[in-house]
Amino acid sequence: MRAETQNTVTEIEKSLELLSQRLNWETAEYRLEEFNARVEDPNLWDDPEAAQKLMRERQMLVDAIDTFKSIKQDLADNIELIELGEMEEDDEVISDAEAALKALQETAAEKELEALLDGEADGNDTFLEINSGAGGTESCDWASMLARMYVRWAEKKGYTVELQSETPGEEAGIKSVAYKITGHNAYGWLKSESGVHRLVRISPYDSAAKRHTSFSSVWVYPVVDDNIEIEVNPSDIRVDTYRSSGAGGQHVNTTDSAVRITHIPTGIVVTSSEKSQHQNRDIAMKALKSRLYQQELDRRNAEINAAHEAKGDAGWGNQIRSYVLQPYQMVKDLRTSHETSDTKGVLDGDLDGFMAATLALKVAGKSRADAQSE
């Protein structure tokens, strides 16, 4: 076996070792048997929410076991093919097996990265908020572009996107929008997107065709499970009801009723625009608890967050990424230095490379300054 191929095999084996540790492979199939026994309980669906949670957890375990077994089997099969090809001096068989190993290495690395999403809330659904910055119509349009980018990304992941609230811009775009994104590891992937995003382009709203810089902020926080107790004192909140408005669109459902809840001690404001005031209040309270829970997570991880929040002085002082469309094409993350000239792809939702780089940086325990010096 060639040295390069042996290195590929070694990398796949390292990924399998990490997957085995994260999965706790020695007990995985026993845990699956326990899940299967609970699924057969005739009283399971007496509590639909608990049943759905159980089914999701079971499916996550099934997927993890299947992934581990598949990678391990594919590795063994391709090693065997290479050995047979070498014995029979069949270069075509060897070449095909080596190509398959290269593809398997990429798959294993991706699954290894997903396995690192083991934070307390990484597996949860998430709320995503986008707010336009100073700059009027320009920033509102940029916020709209970001909203489209994240909806496209979520669709590619197979996630469900639900609009929570939307405030349109006065002339174009949106002032703010909030989504609930549902899917396995939705928060774990998106949490690295919190911060200020900077756009540089020739403004379509400037008759002189001058280059403009716009800023919009993105904030991500997890949807907390019902079994996580977050106490909210009724005297600490103010509830306002009003009529909602929005531009609508393919991924947007708008209604006339809306609820805004303000948490007075922290200044946190959440909104919801569903079909009934009662439903709105319930959703808004869950969003508020999620925000408070995020604060608690930040408090517990103060040192990590201190490094994570060191995002530079551009814009509002929290800039994490620049999207330059003029005079050249480049999207660059300022924390990891990960960059690409495929600006169209990024704005169409190709964000996994940026998210993976930030996750790997955080797992490695490096600061942005460390990454840039390297």
Image (cartoon, rainbow, N blue to C red):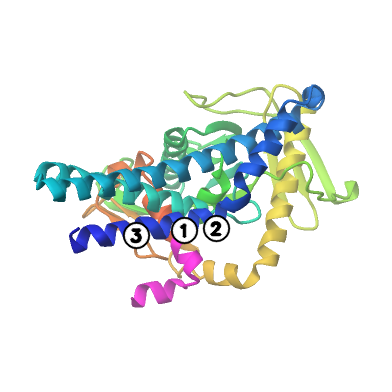
The one of 24 and 297 positioned closer to us in this rendering: 24
Task: Give percent across and percent down for residue 64.
Answer: 52, 43
Task: Give percent across and percent down for residue 291.
Answer: 69, 51
Label 2 SS: helix
Tag 1: Cα neighbours inside 10 Å, few (<14), some, or many (≥20)? Answer: some
Is label 2 in contact with label 1 (beta carbons under 8 Å)? yes
Task: Give percent across and percent down for residue 319.
Answer: 45, 62
Tag 3: Cα neighbours inside 10 Å, few (<14), some, or many (≥20)? Answer: some
Taking 340 as reference, is 367 left or right? right
According to the image, label 2 marks what residue? Answer: 21
Residue 192 within the magenta-colored segment of the rendering: no
Taking 345 as reference, is 223 left or right? right
According to the image, label 3 marks what residue? Answer: 11
Task: Give percent across and percent down for residue 273.
Answer: 67, 29
Residue 241 seen from this side: no
- Identify which residue is drawn at 68% across, 32% down: 36
According to the image, label 1 marks what residue? Answer: 17
Q: Quadrant of the C terminus?
A: bottom left
State how many labels appear. 3
Is label 2 in contact with label 3 (beta carbons under 8 Å)? no
